[in-house]
Image: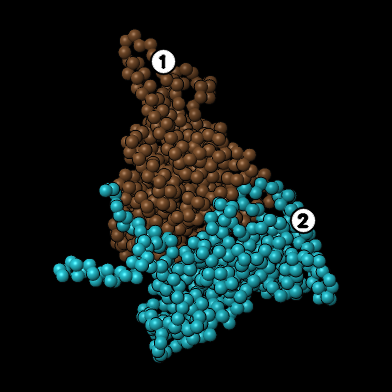
Amino acid sequence: MNRISKTLCASMLALLPVAAMAQIDGEFVKPRTGKFLLQNATVVTVTKGTLTNTSVLVENGKIAQVGTNISTAGAEVIDCTGKFIYPGMIDSGTRLGLVEISSIPETVDYAELGNVTPNMQALTTVNPNSEAIGVTRVSGVTTVLTVPTGGLFPGTAALINLNGYTPDQMYGGFKAVVMNFPSSGRRGRFDRRSDEDVQKDSEKALKEANEIWGNASKYLELKKSGAELQFYPEMDQLAKAVSGELPLLIVVDAASDIQNAIKWVEGKNIKVIFSGVAEGWRVADEIAKAGIPVITGPVQDLPTRQSDRYDTPYANAGKMAKAGVKVALRTDEEENVRNLPFHAAFAAAYGLGKEDALRAITINPAEIFGIADQYGSVEAGKRANLIISTGDPLETKSQILHVFIDGYMIPMSNRHIRLYQEFLERSPGLKAN
Amino acid sequence: MKSSTTQSTPTGEIMIQARFPVRIQAGMWPLKNNYKQMKKLNLILAALLGLGLNYSNAQTQKGNVLIKNATVLTVTKGNLENTDVLVQNGIIRQVGKNLSAPAGVETIDASGKYLMPGIIDAHSHVALDVVNEASSPITSEVRMKDVVNPFEIGIYRALAGGVTISHAMHGSANVVGGQNATLKHRWGAKDPSDIIMQDAPRTIKFALGENPTRVHGRGNGIQPRTRMGVEAVLRNGFNEAIQYKKGWETYNTAKGQKGNTKTPPVYNERLQTLADILDGKIIIHCHSYRADEIYMLINVAKDFAITKLVFQHTNEGFKVAPEIAQYTMGASVFADWWAYKMEVYYSTAFNAAILQRNGAITSINSDSAELIRHLYHEAAKTQRYGGLTDEEALAMITINPAKQLGIDDKVGSIEVGKQADLVIFEGHPLSSYTVPQMTFVDGVKYFDIKADPDDQRQFVSATEMVEPIFLHTHENHQCLQDVDAYFEAFQGAFIEEKH
């Protein structure tokens, strides 16, 4: 047998499993779970300081141990010397999974018809295979609140982890009924209503909100007293916010609207979270006094008024935190949720500080959502949502090397990366044939 | 039209202050001048116009300043530690160590800070009152310099992000849009022509793909409805321009000959502009996304011997990067925008890196009044997505866009002899935590974070009783601005679109 045919035989043997499916090249890398020891890293725990030369053991989807000298027995060891471990980042306001291409209505599922549709469940319409999910999670954003928009009570938001094949596998254990608080601001450059009309519309909407809320309260009372009620899914869902079973996520931005919302909430004895809060810095003390936690962002945004300092959106989170408000961040994005760490960096640079900026995308949202026992820091017993990086994940220069979600090691690939691999050195190049 | 004034200086020269670009009309001038004076005035005017001089340009402020002990990121000549930069009369005169300030020149201590060239945005609509003349698939006759608004707060916000020059572009509603204006952000100028970079070459907006086919094919019932139609509009336009050019050449040749009876062709600004493109007098900046349409325009350009061509957006440029590198002046792209419409669904954030590695001149632009404020950060994303070096990343917002706008001999790097457009940063400009501190245009400081009063407006509308509050609405995208006014029947279908 000559050398060429020997080589040929050997390579044919090696290709046997592939040959069984002759038309298919390459192997698809799936997320995989197991026992992983992330060895000898600098661990930024967020809640327990920064630990050098420390290892993290991941087992059964959880962080089993954080420490030194953890046994390697039965574990796949990932050497993290010179690397950093951070908790997975949480974006507290997105439309991720609810839309594929925003200009194509057939792929837009975040806004249902109607003004009062709190029973519209974001979780139902999360598409686990959305391209944007694969693109987002390799940035280290492992968990997002995905929020329906539209009318006064547009639906119910859900927290999702960015791994899984069904919405239930992705569900992160937190839901909130969404309310778009009647707004006295303009919807954008194309909003050409007169000042008077803007005011009138806002007052009318607030009156309507009060009526609907009153109805939901009555519905709840009747239900509690065991009355026989007609099928009324909208009221049934809204009543969960009235009773405090679900928090009410109030989307509110303009300063006077925030003040109105604070008043509106007073005496209602409900769980409230403000979201958006673009002009929060103008009334930061009042928000702090009301004790309402805030999800703010996008940070990289334009000022709301022409007369505002250029950096007001950058500085907003820092000013509210300084006043004593508990602040989490959101991108309010779909395909660009991956920019969350950069929004946090801008907030850090313009007053929030690096440490608090990191908290605003990890432990703070976990606490606001009431799930801090599972999320938001690197501590034993919590869900294994982790990042391994070459440095601070809020810096563009840092590379994210590995991402774990619920103990699953996520393949560091997506369409953006595959296109890079294919086209960096295209073949054929300039000359065909 | 606002007033123009003429006045005689002691030496008898006539100075003209034009508030707006002025079209000289018969009868405009004071009748008390006798005929001889009128004739003299007209001659001087004609000479000035003929030379293409802009009267007001001479009046823009030029600064003197010495910036000391900075880490100077020259972009073209490496990084210089603890280095001084001396600016005199708006020009960089010296770059070196231990420079001393000539009498009367302000010194700024930049110890521990970074100094880089002013950032250049090759795609913006800031400071434009109108963006789209969408009334025809070809509107090459319109000029953005006629709608420049020097009072727009967006200029100041861009300065606060270190941007000194923006390319104020026509929109993407038609295949051949209007001629763009390159702006220098001289905040506080009241005369629109004072913020136009008068020494920049002419550029024009083209657009391919979804936008022109939607506006005209779907919205207006005329070609182009498809990307085939877009090619046809381009080829027909250029062929018509060749005929038009020939008509003038024939007339001009015949004009001097004895017994000539030929009448001149009818002047047509639209075709003349296309002819100027064919003559290499105008740089094309073409809104494009898909690889097939990019490749189409490269072929059209080759057939008409057009070499001055830059692609804008170019989300699928990475697929035809070798062709872009070989035949064009490169691509000006977003750092990471994708998926907002079908033609950008198959994008990659590694686009800029792939283009750069294939040798295409690549810049990062904003096309947004928001993004323009942090282009240094957008450029830094090329390090996350593709691992570009600091120098390559910074070039994408300085010297590379300068090349694409034809102004790289004047700006885009810190070199002796160049215009002193400079930015001082606290922290490296490619760090996510960096904060721009001061921005200079022609050596004049227009932004200083330490002297930054709250309200920077130059102009407040008397018709607005209460200041409007604009909330985040995902409509920073301005490429199709104003199109809705042309197609009321579409009931806002365009204005919800991005790009």
Q: Secondary structure at mark 1?
A: loop
Which of the chains is brown? Answer: B
What amino acid is found at the position of numbered circle 2 in the picture? Lys
Q: B258 above or below B106?
A: above
What amino acid is found at the position of numbered circle 1 in the picture? Thr
- Residue that mark 2 sits on: A204
Q: Which mark is residue B263?
A: 1
Can you give x and y, in whole percent of width and height, for residue A79 in the image?
36, 80
Which of the chains is cyan? Answer: A
Residue drawn at x 47%, y 65% as measured from the top left: A134
Can you give x and y, in whole percent of width and height, for residue A18 in the image?
34, 68
Residue drawn at x 55%, y 54% as measured from the top left: A102
Can you give x and y, in whole percent of width and height, for residue A106 in the image?
58, 53
Q: Nearer the viewer, residue A357 or B13?
A: A357
Give the left or right position of residue B78, taking residue B432 as reference: left
The residue furthest left is A2
Q: B95 above or below A361?
A: above
Q: Which mark is residue B453?
A: none
